[in-house]
Image: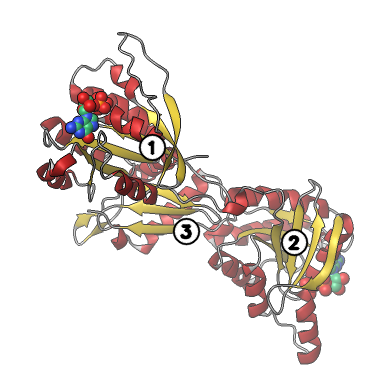
């Protein structure tokens, strides 16, 4: 999924010229046939070393509204829905016009990142307009000359920095990269038994051997889809400690090390004991490390009242960590092997959510709704204004919210946004990072 950039602004500011310069070929040929609504097109381009899609908004300008501002708005509304970044072009030679200002006011209320581009500044032309462009309220404008190719590299690097982060390289060769899974849980929950059951059930590549960190042990197998799975497990080391100390205590250090090597944690619970403080503590560690989590509700064979046992777990999940609400729970028996085959499909499903990228347009439709359902609070008697959201990265999903004084947002409202995001995009069991950035 490539990020999308749209170039907007009033007629004759140089949008097509800039478009051609960025795409590198004479592609944006204007079709002046009246009444012909062209299909919206996208062109591949490279901006600051990033592959992107440039939206061709020229066709949209032929839409009916007959004032300049109305046409700009009509074309921009469609572009904003799809774009990860808007380049708002003004003509620095002509100066900032009333329609630029009116459009800027409207654009400021839209939930999308905007970079102002002051065009036609060749030969130190238009310095005043570039300054005026600050008044539009989108931060530093970039001064360029699309026709003469001046300021373009500045535009490239600034625009690239405003795009969502490039997906990690490892996403690309998914097939070769092992899925990394940590088996965590308190002593005697059945972690070693589960590891053996998985290695027995699936096609083992390597049995337990020392892992990257001191106290972890890794094994690899091929799952039912042929994907390599590396299991990081702390059982081997812990067993030794148990003998030495005679204590049945969870090793927090070993758990953290296993989590660091993994993408997802399978939290093994002893169904006879339910979900207790020690388990929640492990779940919190996984959250802190940014790992996805699912629950293996083990020893299901030994449970007599399964309905009560399930309800007990679900109740605790409801009232404990918000991250755990709706988390996948696989009831199984590592000892008998029953339902162990349900674990890997559940792991893959949760990891898919952990990997998910939400496009800026979709993200901001959610954001708009979340803000209208529950307004941001006041700070020092003034309402905190939030402008837009971006999702620069996944693994774990990270959202950045921009607005003047966004940093002042209190903890409970941040939590509200995170939970609302988790519900909207169906990400139970996935830690979500929220960052707030103040803007001008
Ligand atoms: P659009 O209507 O916004 O797509 O604008 P165009 O790209 O068609 O450009 C409108 C006019 O401005 C054309 O005559 C261009 O040659 C001119 N133009 C575009 N960029 C520059 C520039 O950097 N400097 C100057 N002086 N003229 C430019
Ligand atoms: P670990 O400390 O988490 O690695 O737990 P182990 O795998 O050593 O298991 C602890 C105890 O629970 C052992 O006595 C296992 O036989 C038992 N156990 C493990 N899985 C199951 C299961 O599915 N059902 C039952 N009834 N007992 C189990």
Position of residue 81 measured from the top left corner of the image (x, y, whole percent): 39, 33
Are circles 3 and 1 on residues that touch, CB within 8 Å? no
**Label at residue 433:** 3
Badge 3 or badge 2: first in the primary sequence: 2
Q: Is mark 2 within 8 Å of ligand 2?
A: no
Vertical relation: 259 (above or below) 224: below
**Label at residue 308:** none
**Label at residue 230:** 2
Position of residue 318 measured from the top left corner of the image (x, y, whole percent): 57, 57
Crowd rating for badge 1 (residues with CA inside 10 Å; few <14, some 14–19, many 20+): many
Position of residue 121 measured from the top left corner of the image (x, y, whole percent): 17, 40
Of circles 3 and 2, which is in front?
A: 2
Residue at left 43%, top 24%?
A: 41
Residue at left 75%, top 76%?
A: 187
Of circles 1 and 2, which is in front?
A: 1
* Residue indicated by mark 1: 5
Q: Mark 3 falls on what kind of element?
A: strand
Badge 3 or badge 1: first in the primary sequence: 1
Q: Is residue 435 visible?
A: yes
On the rendered structure, is 433 left or right of 306? left
Q: Nearer the viewer, residue 288 or 393?
A: 393
Vertical relation: 372 (above or below) 313: above
Q: CA distance from mark 1 to mark 2?
A: 38 Å
Q: CA distance from mark 3 to mark 1?
A: 25 Å
Of circles 3 and 1, which is in front?
A: 1
Vertical relation: 414 (above or below) 35: below
Q: Which corner quadrant of the figure contains ligand 2?
A: bottom right
Q: Nearer the viewer, residue 144 or 292?
A: 144
């Amino acid at each position: 999924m490539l990020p999308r950039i749209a170039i907007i602004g009033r007629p004759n500011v140089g949008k097509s010229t800039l478009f051609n310069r960025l795409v590198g070929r004479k592609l944006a040929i204007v079709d002046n046939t009246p009444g012909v609504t062209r299909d919206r097109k996208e062109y591949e381009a490279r901006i600051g070393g990033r592959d992107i899609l440039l939206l061709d908004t020229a066709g949209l300008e032929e839409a009916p509204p007959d004032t300049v501002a109305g046409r700009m708005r009509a074309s921009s509304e469609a572009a904003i829905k799809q774009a990860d970044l808007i380049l708002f072009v003004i003509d620095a030679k002509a100066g900032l016009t009333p329609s630029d200002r009116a459009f800027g006011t409207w654009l400021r209320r839209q939930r999308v990142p905007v970079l102002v581009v002051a065009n036609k500044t060749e030969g130190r032309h238009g310095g005043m307009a570039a300054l005026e462009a600050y008044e539009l309220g989108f931060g530093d404008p970039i001064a360029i000359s699309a026709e003469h190719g001046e300021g373009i590299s500045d535009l490239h690097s600034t625009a690239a920095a405003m795009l969502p982060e490039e997906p990690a390289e490892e996403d690309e060769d998914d097939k070769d990269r092992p899925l990394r899974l940590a088996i965590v849980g308190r002593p005697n929950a059945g972690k070693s038994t589960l590891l053996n059951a998985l290695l027995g059930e699936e096609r083992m590549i390597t049995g337990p051997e020392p892992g990257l960190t001191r106290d972890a042990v890794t094994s690899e197998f091929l799952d039912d889809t042929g994907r390599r799975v590396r299991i990081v497990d702390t059982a081997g080391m812990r067993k030794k400690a148990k003998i030495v100390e005679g204590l049945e205590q969870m090793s927090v250090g070993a758990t953290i090390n296993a989590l660091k090597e993994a993408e997802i944690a399978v939290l093994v619970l002893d169904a006879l004991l339910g979900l207790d403080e020690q388990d929640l503590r492990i779940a919190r560690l996984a959250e802190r490390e940014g790992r996805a989590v699912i629950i293996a509700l083990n020893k299901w064979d030994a449970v007599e009242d399964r309905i009560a046992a399930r309800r007990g777990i679900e109740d605790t999940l409801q009232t404990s960590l918000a991250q755990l609400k709706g988390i996948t729970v696989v009831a199984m028996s590592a000892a008998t092997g029953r339902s162990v085959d349900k674990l890997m499909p559940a792991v893959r499903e949760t990891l898919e959510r952990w990997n998910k990228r939400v496009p800026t347009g979709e993200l901001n439709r959610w954001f708009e709704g979340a803000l209208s359902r529950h307004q941001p609070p006041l700070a020092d008697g003034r309402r905190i204004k939030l402008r837009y959201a971006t999702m620069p990265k996944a693994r774990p999903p990270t959202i950045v919210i921009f607005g003047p004084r966004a940093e002042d947002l209190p903890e409970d409202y941040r939590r509200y946004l995170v939970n609302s995001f988790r519900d909207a995009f169906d990400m139970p069991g996935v830690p979500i990072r929220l960052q707030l950035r103040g803007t001008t």
